[in-house]
Image: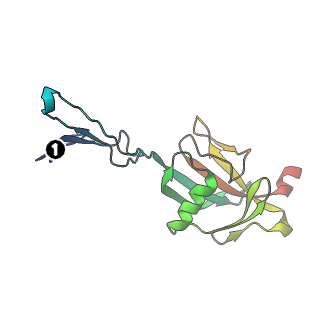
Amino acid sequence: AVVSTQSGHYGRGQYGIYFVRQPLHPSIRVGPLVTLALFSKMKGQLFLLCLMGAIMATKDVRIIITKGYPDSEHAIRNFTVVGNNDNATLIQVMDNAVAKGQLTYEARVFEPWGKYIDTLDDTHAEEADSQFWQILHTNSTGDFVSSKLGASSLNITGDHSVKFRLRSWLDFHH
């Protein structure tokens, strides 16, 4: 028999009593987190064995793609990529989105800096217009700030939101 509670499921199996714990928060996915209590009457001793499955904390990352900055910035895409490793870089999140059919991108590698994003979905940063994809991420207060790191190095933290803003280097000369 299995008894379900808010914190998990209890049951009795071949080797004793078990408990499967639910995640502490919906944004945390865990592998089987199981505690087994095994009782043996060998030599009158009570053995307690606790086995815990691998915990893999994951996070969801919201990606917003905008253009029209600074005059009329508007989102052309806004979606959430679920199931990213907790220590994932932005490029790993993007690769996860590609694998799930949520995003396409093109990038060039510039050593030692990593990948330079040229195209997101069908929107290309035109070199002739001095365009580039600016990366912004949320800080501890939830505000978007410009990243000092590229997509290959930026670990996503905070409330897990990233904005790609199509910009022109010419914007900085006004």
Residue shown at 52% from the left, 59% from the top = 79
The answer to whether residue 3 shows anywhere in this view is: no
The outermost residue toward the right is: 173
Q: Is residue 128 above or below residue 13?
A: below
Residue shown at 45% from the left, 45% from the top = 57
Residue shown at 79% from the left, 53% from the top = 112
The quarter of the displayed image where residue 19 is located: top left
The quarter of the displayed image where residue 20 is located: top left
Residue shown at 36% from the left, 38% from the top = 24
* Closest to the observer, 120 or 154: 154
Q: Position of residue 164 (x, y in %)?
A: 66, 56
Q: Is residue 82 above or below residue 48?
A: below
Q: Is residue 119 left or right of residue 129?
A: left
Tell me the element at label 1: strand
Q: Position of residue 64 (x, y in %)?
A: 59, 56
The outermost residue toward the front is: 43
The quarter of the displayed image where residue 124 is located: bottom right
Q: Is residue 162 above or below residue 140?
A: below
The answer to whether residue 152 shows anywhere in this view is: yes
Q: Position of residue 88 (x, y in %)?
A: 57, 49
Write down the residue under mark 1: 11
* Closest to the observer, 96 or 159: 96
* Closest to the observer, 148 or 76: 148
